[in-house]
Amino acid sequence: MALYFGVDKKVVVLFTIVLGVFTQFFAGITALIALVPFVGPLIVKVLAIPLFWLLNGLGYFVSIFAIKKGYSRELVGSRVLTFAVLVGLVLGYIIGHIIPIR
């Protein structure tokens, strides 16, 4: 999408690498925290769930500005996609805890 809008290829690659390193760093830190018995997994859940809801809330605020700019049709598609991801995460979490892993 960035190439379509005329962003330089080097900037796209640099952004992708920086984003990949940041996400891997965050995943590594949370994995180390989750290794602590009893409280580690609880801490990871307490950190991860509010971060997801914060990003979703920011999406609603961005939606307000998009509606004012006249992008309501595109906004509906993105909000439906966000809702589908939320439902998928919740169902995956529930099913993952219902089905025991042996």
Image: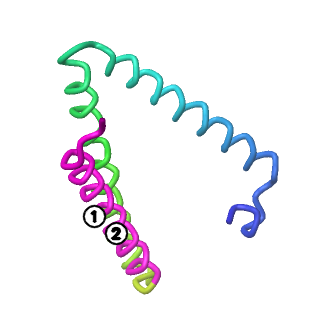
Q: For residue 63, which quarter of the picture?
A: bottom left
Q: Which residue is mark 2?
A: 84
Report the magenta residues as a range.
74-102
Q: Quadrant of the N terminus?
A: bottom right
- The amino acid type found where label 2 is placed reads Ala
Between marks 1 and 2, how big is the CA–CA gap? 5 Å
Task: Give SS at disc 2.
Answer: helix
Task: Say if 98 sits above or below 41 in the image.
Answer: below
Residue at 52% x, 35% y is 23
Task: Give SS at disc 1.
Answer: helix
Residue at 70% x, 61% y is 2
Q: For residue 56, which quarter of the picture?
A: bottom left
How many marks are shown on the rendered structure?
A: 2
**Is-magenta flag for residue 63?**
no
- The amino acid type found where label 1 is placed reads Val
Tell me, yes or no, whether the two marked residues, 1 and 2, touch with CB atoms within 8 Å: yes
Residue at 45% x, 81% y is 71
Q: Which residue is mark 1?
A: 87
Out of 61 and 69, give the one closest to the viewer: 61
Q: Residue furthest front?
A: 102
Q: Position of residue 39 (x, y in %)?
A: 19, 18
What mark, if any, has residue 50 been given in the picture? none
Q: Main secondary structure of the magenta part?
A: helix
What is the basis of the colouring in this image? rainbow
